[in-house]
Amino acid sequence: EWKEEDVCMPVKCCGEKSIPFCGKCPDFPCREMREFYEESEGHKKAYALMDSLRGGKNDTMKRGERNMKLAVIYHSQTGNTKQAAEWIAEGMNRISGAEAKTFSIDDVDTAFVCEAKGVVIGCPSYMASMTPELRTWLMQGRKLKLAGKLGGAFATEQYTHGGGEMVIQSILTNELVFGMLCYSGGVSQGKPVIHMGPIGVNGNIEPHNDLNHYKGVFVLFGERFARKAAELFGGALTGTEDVTT
């Protein structure tokens, strides 16, 4: 017996918006719709039809391909910077078409990074600068073919004023030297504003702080970075900003 709750998500949503089908929605393709139409081959064919009616502007999503590689490389001493890197990659992977992976400087997939269109690098604050380990690792920038890629930076710190901004500036300076195109977004992306790159304060020393408080900012930075990479290097990528933790 048919029940009201049996109505599928697109039908219910279209009814609420008084539109005949998803392709007529100004938010097409939304995240919920993308997830629904990936569930079966029949759903994918329906999406392809709607996309063709709109001029095929979302071909990358239609194929379900993840064809733009993005790398987040980090040096982590206590695990906080590793966690921040994973949050950034999580945000990147919310953008359809992006394939983001994280790598410790001790275990970098050189082939993947060389193919990547964007690379974000981060580490903890060490005397208001990057760690010696990251500085040494950056010397191999030419081997990773960083020139021409979109570059970004992030940092973690143990104190509220622990020098995270200086860490990011020093990383971005190195990226510029390698010929990378450095991303900020800044005020152009609206609130929350992320100048230069995200910074998280862990709770190792300040009991009132917790790195989890900053998850939303790291995830959001990843989304924005991936969106800019798609704009620069091609691909009809879409996604929804979400700053919840």
Image (spheres, rainbow, N blue to C red):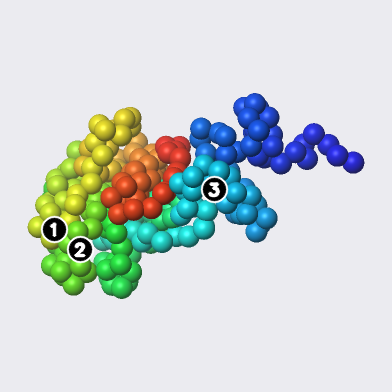
Along the viewing direction, whichever of 143 and 66 lies nearer the viewer:
66
Distance from disc 2 to disc 1, alpha carbons, whole Å, reads 7 Å
> Which quarter of the figure is the N terminus placed in?
top right
Distance from disc 3 to disc 1, alpha carbons, whole Å, reads 39 Å
Return the x and y of residue 178 as percentages of the image width and height: 13, 60
Secondary structure at badge 1 equals: loop
Q: Residue at the location (51% across, 35% down)? A: 27
What amino acid does circle 2 point to? Leu
Residue contact between numbered discs 2 and 1, judged by CB atoms under 8 Å = yes
Residue 26 vs 104, above or below: the answer is above
Q: Which mark is residue 146?
A: 2
Distance from disc 3 to disc 2, alpha carbons, whole Å, reads 37 Å
Circle 2 crowding by C-alpha within 10 Å: few under 14, some 14–19, many from 20: many
Sequence order check: which comes first, mark 3 or mark 2? 3
Q: Which mark is residue 179?
A: 1
Residue 179 vs 144, above or below: the answer is above
Along the viewing direction, whichever of 109 and 66 lies nearer the viewer:
66
Q: Quadrant of residue 201?
A: top left
